[in-house]
Image (cartoon, coloured by chain):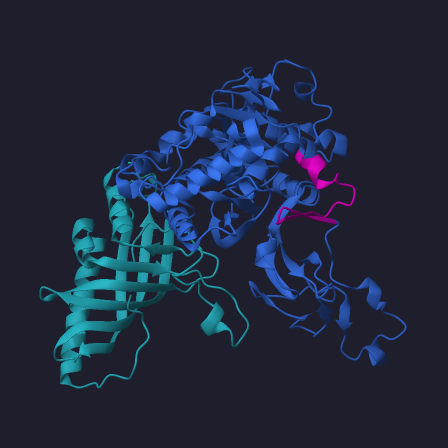
Chain colours: A blue, B cyan
Amino acid sequence: MDKNIFGDTDLDAGVVDRKIFVDEEIYQRELETVFTRAWLFVGHQSQIPNPGDFFTSRMGEESVILVRDKKDEIHVFLNSCRHRGMKVCRYDSGNTSLFTCPYHAWTYSTDGKVRGIPQYKDLYEGVLDREKWGLIEVAQLVNYKGAVFATWDKDAPDFETYMGDALMHLDMALDCRDGRPGGSEVIGVHRWVLPTNWKYTAENFLGDSYHNPSHRSVDLIGIGPSGRAGVKGRRDGELETATHVWINFPQGHGVHSAVQPSFGNYTPPASDDPEIGEYFRECHRLRQERLGEESRLLPFTGNFFPNTGYHGGQPRGLVVWHPHGVDKTEGWRFFLVDADAPKSVKDYLRKFYMRYSGPAGMTEQDDMENWLYASKSCKGVIARRNPFNYQLSKDASQQNPTVNGIQIRGRVTTQMTEHMARGYYRRWQDYVNDADWDTLLGKHDPRHNVVQAAE
Amino acid sequence: MPDNTVSAPITRDDAYFRLRQEVEEFYYDEASALDERRFDEWLECLHEDILYFMPMRFNVKFGQHAERENTTADEGMSWFNEDKWTLKKRVEQILTGVHYAEEPLSRVSHLITNVQVKQASPSAADAQEIKTSCRFFVYQNRVEHETYNYVGRRYDTLVRENGRFQVIRREIILEQNILLAKALTTFF
């Protein structure tokens, strides 16, 4: 691939060419090299609890079906008939024993196999091998603590290798508040179209804490869990006394988490409601009991390469930024609670999630405004002669440092930084260049292999 | 909380039409308060115990619409599921002048039409609590080239407080599946 496809992008210098957000050729390459190879989040097992349950999702630009077959096995299929491509499912979710194409009425069972082809005996017998014309299935799929990820690449490393040390940060979003592994459920999915390139949104979730000023309006008025008690800010001060850590992983993932200095410094959310507050305090106590010192590590936000973001607590959920044309993104935000939390807690959380998140959320509306007009600028001829600055806290990261007594794995800073973005775009270039998997996992990236190497 | 189900068809007599006119006037006043950016006056149109609800809509199999087409207020996520406190916060946010999704302010027009009174109690002549349905077309133009058209149905419960109506329940049915707007910064 022509190296110049990335224009003036120079991640060692900390600059990114604006063209990568608007260039059609790059976008087509991304669809072919990123979204066919990387592990992508598809949905959650709680959305398909029973055999025959399905949820229609996306991978990249393409529609897929997440389905639990009659034998209780989870599959992900391309939502496209093998005959002429019509969607075999146009319902958002439901329960079925068959997917029937509305066009020529080919039917498929929930395990993807061809069930029926009209007039097969008269018109196809001896020619069409039904075994070969089932629904197109992903090459690999994993149900990780209820979260279903999939990839189209049979040569992709297994999910845990792909996630590397970022996996424990995903755990903090998926695990119960009291530290039991897994146990979360999806309570709803926001889906909306944003006029921006998908990388803007992914990059924001990598841990761009520097954009805090854009949320001044909600910080002024106070919309957090305890907002009703007059507490200002958009979240409760769970992380106030913690040391924040910004981490870049060799595979391109990036997170912003935090380490409490000691056990005593934790402030639970929900100070306005004694019952709910008590629930969170008890969860926190149990989490300490289960995880010990490690429980001082708390989640905030992050993005797993390429487009699965998360919020770890306030709010809590996964979000997928699906490419939808070079200048459009479809946001799918999956909101999480502990499945066994009392209804009062679920109600409390979902109402906070709704006022905070997504297109109707008071906080994230302001993100959408910025992503639109920022990404639009990349079309300008003059604008494109001037690359973006990504130099925030350049050369400030350390490899696997100890923070408040806990070793944090990855390249880490304890100050705001754009090193997650720089690392992300390094891997992204490798994907666009169709590199081998060792390269995509960052095994050849000296920043992740030499202790204390310059970032 | 009252809902939008109606027990029996209302009789369309003179009292009905007078009541409908009163409701229409109320809706036009409310729309003007929003479009003319008198947000605090708009809040006065809403009862202290209001439920302001906009479900998400799904594509479901024929026959499952009643059960599964819309999210409900009682559980899960919707676009809006708010009380007066949250709506006040939304107004307060706009008034900070740094809510960038509405700064500078959008240009918005609310067209309210197809207004019908579905139920009046104790009677149309002495309506203390009524259920209505109407259609809305909300046009939003933002900054320069951004334009959004929101079309849908609204099912309200209004109660008379000190002689004037207030909305105590509003269900907003936006005719979209995946939201085709980047942000819902306007009120409905």
Furthest residue toward right: A126
Residue drawn where x is 73% and y is 62% of the image: A135
User: As displayed, is residue B82 above or below residue A409?
Assistant: below
Quick one: A342 or B8, which is closer to the camera? A342
Instruction: Give left or right: position of A70 versus A324.
Output: right
Circle count: 0
Quick one: A380 or B108, which is closer to the camera? B108
Q: Residue A335: x percent and y percent?
A: 49, 49
Q: Tell me, yes or no, if residue A368 can be seen here.
A: no
Instruction: Give left or right: position of B176 versus B100.
Output: right
Quadrant including the C terminus of chain A: top right
User: As displayed, is residue A112 above or below residue B16?
Assistant: above
Whether residue A152 is in magenta: the answer is: yes
> Residue A232 lies in what quarter of the image?
top left
Q: Residue B96: x percent and y percent?
A: 25, 38
Q: Residue B163: x percent and y percent?
A: 9, 66
> Residue B80 lies in what quarter of the image?
bottom left
Residue drawn where x is 33% and y is 51% of the image: B141
Quick one: A455 or A299, which is closer to the camera? A299
Q: Which span is picked out in magenta?
A: A140-163
Quadrant including the N terminus of chain A: top right
Instruction: Give left or right: position of B124 versus A160.
Output: left
Residue drawn where x is 51% and y is 48% of the image: A338
Q: Tell me, yes or no, if residue B118 can be seen here.
A: yes
> Residue A271 lies in what quarter of the image?
top left
User: As displayed, is residue A248 above or below residue A107?
Assistant: above
User: As displayed, is residue A160 above or below residue A89?
Assistant: above
Instruction: Give left or right: position of B153 versus A288.
Output: left
Q: Residue A424: x percent and y percent?
A: 60, 30
Whether residue B70 is in magenta: the answer is: no
